[in-house]
Image (spheres, rainbow, N blue to C red):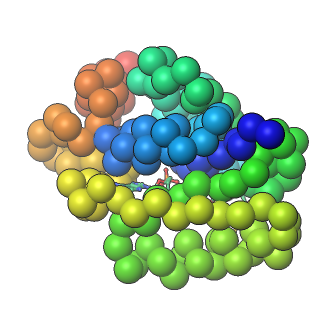
Amino acid sequence: MAKVAVYPGSFDPVTTGHLDIIRRTSNIFDEVIVAVFVNPNKNPLFTREERVEMLEEVLKDFNNVMVDDFAGLLTEYLKEQDGDVIVRGLRAVSDFESEFQMASMNKKLAPEIETLFMMTNTKYAYLSSSAVKEVASFGGCIEELVPEYVIDKLIKRLKKEDK
Ligand code: COD
């Protein structure tokens, strides 16, 4: 039976650290769904459609990776998609506490679904979407921090040139 992994996140925007986790996950599982969470309580820099579009573009060469979005509970989304495993990336000890809480809650909600943690590539251990947005907002160089396709979009959005 094909094993389906779901890699959920905000991806606001996708970074090189996310891409590294997706690439490594796609080498392990038959199918990977990168699932953009639509959070009604947050005001992301990029819309749901924009985050999905950027991911689709940068992942177009991966045959077993698809991009989707979801609202509501992650565990319900996995059940709808016949997903087996939730994949999360771990950067530092500081990630552990919130990830442990999230994985435990998801286990309580759906005991049949496992959470798999993938250690960050040390090259990207410092990388997060919010750090990239902060660096870009002050004019810092974001090459290699986000995919080439995202650089212009991020700079324009922060300067509000695309609105
Ligand atoms: N290296 C390795 N991993 C990384 C890196 C990096 N440089 N950067 C990010 N990651 C990992 C993160 O650790 C995370 O695992 C993943 O990539 C996505 O990161 P983000 O920041 O884009 O996404 P999050 O952490 O904001 O996503 C949170 C969810 C949307 C998954 C979560 O809020 C959720 O499941 N919401 C649905 C509601 C729900 O079911 N709630 C109950 C559970 S408590």
Q: Is residue 111 left or right of 6 when viewed as pictured?
A: right
Q: Is residue 129 left or right of 22 when viewed as pictured?
A: left
Q: 17 or 136: nearer the eye? A: 17
On screen, residue 8 above or below 34: below
Q: Quadrant of the C terminus?
A: top left
Q: Quadrant of residue 70?
A: top right
| Residue 53 shows up from this direction | no
Q: Quadrant of ligand 1?
A: bottom right
Q: 155 or 104: nearer the eye? A: 104
- Place of residue 63 in the rendered image (x, y in percent of width and height, measured from the top left): 55, 21
Q: Residue at x 28, y 48 (%)?
A: 132
Q: Quadrant of the N terminus?
A: top right
Q: 42 or 73: nearer the eye? A: 73
- Place of residue 149 in the rendered image (x, y in percent of width and height, measured from the top left): 32, 21
Q: Residue at x 65, y 34 (%)?
A: 31
On screen, residue 106 above or below 28: below
- Place of residue 102 in the rendered image (x, y in percent of width and height, measured from the top left): 65, 71
Q: Residue at x 59, y 78 (%)?
A: 100
| Residue 123 shows up from this direction | yes
Q: Quadrant of residue 67?
A: top right
- Place of residue 80 in the rendered image (x, y in percent of width and height, measured from the top left): 87, 42
